[in-house]
Image (tube, grey):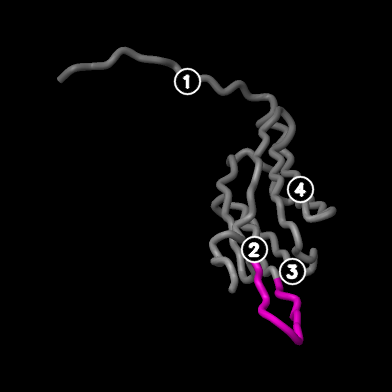
Amino acid sequence: LRAGFSDIEPKIEVADNEDAVTVTAELPGINEDDVELKISADGYLTISGEKKEKKQTTEKGRCFSEISYGMFKRTIPLPQDINFDAATADYNNGLLTVELPKLPEEKQKAKTIKIGKAHKA
C-alpha cells in the first residue's frame, strides 16, 4: 500500500523583507539532484522534482508504507521588484532556501496607496 501522491507537495514559507524575498521549502527525503528551480518571465518561481522510491524486498509478510513517492511541482508568485538574475539557492538536510534580492531602485521606493472617496453615478 502507498499513500496518495498529493501528499508530496512541499510545504513552503515566503518571507518578504526590505532587501529580499526568501522562499523556503521542505523537501524531506528528496535528493538535491532531483530538484529543479525555474523563474518564469512573468514572475513565478516553480519548484519541481521527484521523490524516488527505494526498492524494498521482504521474504515474509507484507510491506506497509505511508511514505509518498513521485513527481511534485509547486509554483509561487513573486513580486515584480525582484532581481531574478541575482537569485541564489541552498539545499541542506531536505530544506531548500531560495534568496531573491530586490532591485536597488525598488528598495528606495515607498509604496503607498491613496484612499479616495467613492463616486456614485
Badge 3 vs badge 1, beta-carbon distance below 8 Å: no
C-alpha gap between disc 4 and disc 1: 31 Å
What is the x, y in percent for residue 67?
66, 65
C-alpha gap between disc 4 and disc 2: 14 Å
Is 77 on the left or on the right of 90, as rendered? left
**Residue 65 falls in image quadrant:** bottom right
Callout 3: 10 Å neighbours few (<14), some, many (20+)? few
Query: For the residue labelled by badge 2, is the local secondary structure a helix, a strand or a loop?
Result: strand
Q: Nearer the viewer, mark 1 or mark 2?
A: 2
Q: Residue at x 40, y 15 (%)?
A: 115
Identify the residue under disc 3.
34
Residue 58 covered by magenta stretch:
yes
C-alpha gap between disc 3 and disc 4: 15 Å
Q: Which of 70 and 22 is in front in this view?
A: 70
Badge 3 vs badge 4, beta-carbon distance below 8 Å: no
Q: Which of marks 4 and 1 is nearer the N terminus?
A: 4
Q: Earlier in the sequence, mark 4 or mark 2?
A: 2
Q: Which residue is drawn at 69% across and 24% down?
A: 108
Q: Earlier in the sequence, mark 1 or mark 2?
A: 2
Query: For the residue labelled by badge 1, is the local secondary structure a helix, a strand or a loop?
Result: loop
Identify the residue under disc 2.
48
Identify the residue under disc 1.
113
Q: Which amino acid does label 4 sit on?
A: Thr
C-alpha gap between disc 1 and disc 2: 36 Å
Q: What stretch is highlighted in magenta?
A: 52-66
Identify the residue under disc 4.
97
